[in-house]
Image: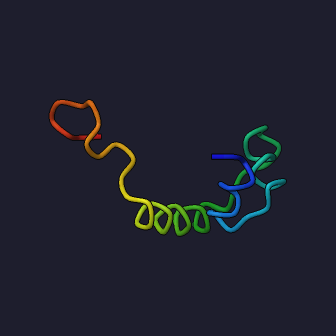
C-alpha cells in the first residue's frame, strides 16, 4: 500500500501522513482511532489466519 493509498483510507492528506511518519507532528488521536476502526472493519483483521499457533494477535 502506498502512502497516498493509506492517506486516502484514513481520510487525510498524503502530506499529513508524511508529517506523522517523520515526527513533524502527531495525528489527532480521536480522528485516528475512528478512522482505524473503520479501516479495520472494512478490511478485516490483518493477522487472522496467520502463522500464530493460537490465532491471537
Q: Residue at x 48, y 69 (%)?
A: 38
Q: Residue at x 65, y 54 (%)?
A: 6
| Residue 31 falls left or right of residue 12 | left
Q: Residue at x 36, y 53 (%)?
A: 45
Q: Position of residue 11 (x, y in %)?
A: 68, 68
Q: Residue at x 24, y 31 (%)?
A: 52
Q: Position of residue 10 (x, y in %)?
A: 63, 63
Q: How is the image coloured?
A: rainbow
Q: Position of residue 54 (x, y in %)?
A: 15, 35
Placement of the C terminus among the 4 image quadrants: top left
- Where is 54 relative to 37, above or below? above
The tally of labels here is: 0
Foreground: 2 or 21? Answer: 2
| Residue 39 falls left or right of residue 1 | left
- Where is 35 relative to 6, above or below? below
Q: Position of residue 15 (x, y in %)?
A: 84, 53
Foreground: 31 or 10? Answer: 10
Quadrant for residue 13, please give it.
bottom right
Quadrant for residue 42, please give it.
bottom left
Foreground: 48 or 56? Answer: 48
Amino acid at each position: 500500500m502506498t502512502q497516498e493509498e493509506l492517506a486516502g483510507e484514513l481520510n487525510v492528506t498524503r502530506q499529513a501522513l508524511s508529517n506523522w511518519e517523520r515526527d513533524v507532528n502527531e495525528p489527532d488521536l480521536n480522528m485516528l482511532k475512528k478512522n482505524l476502526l473503520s479501516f479495520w472493519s472494512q478490511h478485516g483483521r490483518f493477522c487472522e489466519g496467520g502463522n500464530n499457533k493460537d490465532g491471537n494477535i
